[in-house]
Image: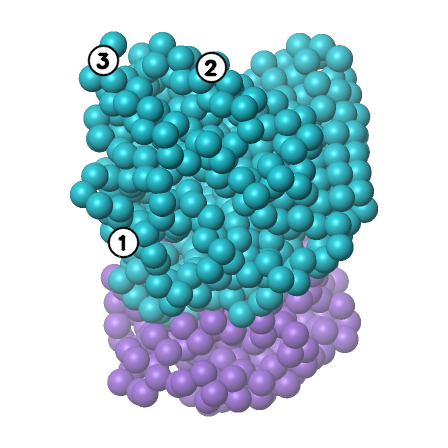
Chain colours: A purple, B cyan
Amino acid sequence: MIEIKNLHANVNGKEILKGINLKVNAGEVHAIMGPNGSGKSTLAQVLSGHPAYQVTQGEVLFEGQDLLDMEPEERAHAGVFLAFQYPVEIPGVSNSYFLKAGLNEIRKSRGQEELDSFQFLKLLKEKMKVVEMDQSFINRPVNEGFSGGEKKRNEILQMAVLEPKLAILDETDSGLDIDALKIVSSGVNKLKSPSNATIVVTHYQRLLNYIVPDFVHVLVHGRIVKSGGKELALELEANGYDFIREEMLQSA
Amino acid sequence: MSVEMNHYTNEFQTFQQNGAAKSPDWVNDVRTAALSVFTGKGFPTTKQEDWKYTNVTPIARAPFRYSASAPAVPAELVTSLLIGDTEQHLIVFVNGHFSAEHSRLQSLPAGLTVKNLIAAYGSHADLIKAHLSKYAPYDKNPFTALNTAFINDGAFIHAAKGTKSSLPVHLLFISTAAGDAPAASHIRNLIIAEEGAEVRIAHSFASAQDNTNLTNVVTEVSAGRESIVELVKVQRESEKAFHVEHLHVHQEPRSTSRVFSLAVGGAIARNEMSVIIGGETTECNLNGLYITSGEQLIDHHTFMHHIHPECPSHELFKGILMDKSRAVFNGKVYVEPEAQKTDSKQTNRNLLLSDEAVVDTKPELEIFADDVKCTHGAAVGGMNETHSFYLKTRGISEGSARGILTVGFAAEVTQKIDDPVLRRFVDTIVVDHLRRKFGTGNLPEIVHA
Ligand SMILES: Nc1ncnc2c1ncn2[C@@H]1O[C@H](COP(=O)(O)OP(=O)(O)OP(=O)(O)O)[C@@H](O)[C@H]1O
Ligand SMILES: [Mg+2]
């Protein structure tokens, strides 16, 4: 589905990603863990096309297409979705207008017919059930005044509506209470299929009990320094990142 | 005397022979005094600091005529300008003349008077004498002098002690072509809220056709002790029109004023808004939104005068500029030595949607008390990149994101309007206007948190 080769990226002239290699196939769940400031969100933003980051080296193929050559909205049309670590508030604009605009542009780009308000509302209400979100959120301005957890849940609602091929969830678990964590995870699991893939960025093994990864990668200082199965997350939980740093020192 | 001043001296004579007789003698004395101030000063020029960025030569040059009566305007036009489908106490003026035909003042609650000034001389003579021309000095601003020289009619609102009006009062001023010469309307409004009264007012201006008229307004508001006055101005005149208003709000102790200015019309539009915070723990909220396009120039000059201690004042003005349009924002805050513990915040944010649009923004803080909190900030820029990126990651194109975020930018200030009916009124006008300017029906309705 996506193949990242030797990806280097800068922000404000400072190199943050220093050669990322990662391959994700359809049907897989990959977890990315790593210390604060190691570049996890940067990787997510670069994959979505944030203009503040400059790719200086490497390539990213998404279903065989050059992802880095596409505008952010074209990536969304192609099926890339990013659940933000810090979702943005858009005052004045209702959640439903925002989502309908996005969904219809995605449908249009695929030659599908646009949904009218009635059809869209029906779909939205179904998806709100999946993430157990109250219908009062339909007409509230996007994320404005939402609690931290409500914002995260709203990100997963958007994912449910837009049905991406590749979903990148950047610390969607942070800020969620225990019940919400279960609801959101089960939502993510319900949306999982053999034809789509998920990258979850998280600090906590707890999430991975619910969204079980096929692979776990550790990102340190802009590089993936270790990859493994789901047991790697347990190891990190028990020992922190120090053992990896030590391994790195030894191999250096 | 210049040609321009000769014109106005002649106009004044015509005016005296016509409508002027309808007012008491003392009003005529004020007019005569104001005329001599006006002819002495003439129109302002860009050499004056207050008018540096706003050149009113096109107003000075045009031979505007006072008309003794108002041409008819169609009922459908009036209907299209109302506040949605809600009931409202409506008073309509056409070229400054009261229109009984279009006004709807049947169901006023006890204690609330809404009538035209000429009629009010009969019922509220002493009150008018006590307030009229007491807040708006005509020796400073030539347009105020010109307005005062031509005081004739306008809206008169009186809310007696403790009166609370549940419905909004709508002052609707329509300008229309009158004969060949461009028409001038010098509108004079007086709004008096007595102790503990609460009133919400839509103060709206529109044109019947796309033509060059001059609407020159002076509005004086007296907010009595513990009263609440919300005044929402909506100026959507023709883009060929000239519009000038000097609004004065005088606040008594513990009163609250909420003033909002939406300005989308006019070739040149100038709003001066002065608030005299004349009593302890008095609150003032002054907010506004201007949207300019083509070659429009919209200018706001605000003045917050803190005289007494412990008064908060909040001010947020936002601007959306397109094409080759221009906007001016000048926010003066004056804190007297006695006004300790003043808490004043002023912000001006501008969204430039074109490289050729220009905004001149200037805060002007004069603070003579030492224990105060006064902040100000001004920003001029393009689309917010973080917001725009968020929308695009959801598949929304650059063009749609621009529209959506422009609506959002506007919504952030319209949400300051307290009354939901008036807020809805403004929101609808803003979105309709942006839809026209963006050439798409595809913009969201505004919702508030
Ligand atoms: N716009 C920016 N300007 C300057 N530095 C930036 C910018 N964006 C990111 N960085 C820096 O890049 C580094 C990586 O940040 P990133 O947000 O990718 O970390 P992260 O791994 O997601 O961390 P966390 O676990 O705390 O979310 C940090 O040192 C951060 O300060
Ligand atoms: Mg991060």
Determine contact: label 3, label 2, CB under 8 Å.
Answer: no
At 61% across and 23% down in the image, what residue appears?
B134
Q: Residue A2: percent from the left, percent from the top?
A: 37, 73
Expressed as whole percent of the image width and height from the top left, the position of residue B82 reads 48, 61
Q: Which residue is mark 2?
A: B33
Dot 3 or dot 1: first in sequence order is: 3
Task: Pinpoint the chain carrying mark 3.
Answer: B
Q: CA distance from mark 3 to mark 1?
A: 31 Å
The residues bearing labels 3 and 2 have C-alpha atoms spaced at a distance of 19 Å
The answer to whether residue A99 is left or right of residue B212 is right
Residue where numbered disc 3 is placed: B2
Depth check, front residue: B118 or B281: B118
Q: Residue at label 1?
A: B209
Please, what secondary structure does the residue beneath circle 2 have? helix
Task: Report the mark closest to the observer, 3 or 1.
Answer: 3
Among the 4 quarters of the image, the one containing residue A164: bottom left
